[in-house]
Amino acid sequence: MKTLKQLFYYSFVILAIFCTSCEAEDGMDGVNGEQGIPGQDGADGQNGQDGEDGNANVTGVTVDPFPSWTEGIYLGQEANFVEIDEPLLTQEVVDDALVLVYFQLFGDNIWYPMTYAFPFDNGTDEIITYTYEEDMITIYALSSNGPVNAGISKVRYFIISTNDAGRSHLSSKEYILQDLLDNDVDINIYEEVANYYNR
């Protein structure tokens, strides 16, 4: 019986030594799983401003209500103006992007493009136009007789940029305009621009 116990003990020790001295081999990697379903686009922003379009190169912003006019100068002529702060207009964006501005008058649901001239029978006219620079868009209203208190109720503008002009002989702004022209989009018609950019 003692011999049987010793035999069992030695067999167990040998088996334990044998098991601990062997190293396991790495198995083959399993097959990769399928790609997950893409997530949904985020919702529009709040505080009266639209979020960015699915095309990250186009932003549409509405200014409603339109601020009060201030008297100033446009190209040496007396004019009313309104400055709109726009932090998206970095210097890089100003250099490469196209900004298109539209407005409504007296609360009517008709969009007019800027620059816009209203000619009168007496030979005078009223002009509503804009400029843009780093951090700012400025709207002007003037006539042959001086500043105009234009009844603008709402302004909407698009900041359109492109990462690659795609045509070496065109600047980014020229490329954007050419793209709109190639797709039969009239930049003087707000609805066509808004529909083209899904804004």
Image (cartoon, helix red, strand yellow):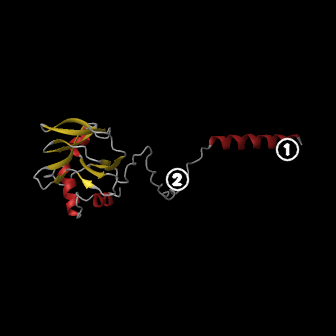
Give the mark, 2 or 1, whose residue is nearer the N terminus.
1
Q: Do the residues labelled 2 and 1 touch (CB within 8 Å)?
A: no
Comparing 53 with 111, the one in front is: 111
Depth-wise, is mark 2 or mark 1 nearer the camera? 2
Residue projecting furthest to the right? 1
Q: Nearest the camera: 39 or 86?
A: 86
Question: Is residue 104 or residue 45 the one in the foreground?
Answer: 104
Disc sitting over residue 4 in the figure: 1
Closer-to-camera residue (162/20): 162
Question: Which residue: 29% across, 51% down?
Answer: 103
Name of the residue lying farthest toward the left = 123
Q: Is residue 19 left or right of residue 186?
A: right
Mark 2 and mark 1: span between their CA atoms? 45 Å
> Residue 29: which numbered mark, if any?
2
Mark 2 crowdedness (10 Å alpha carbons): few <14, some 14-19, many ≥20? few
17 relative to 4 in the view: left or right: left
Amino acid type at mark 1: Leu
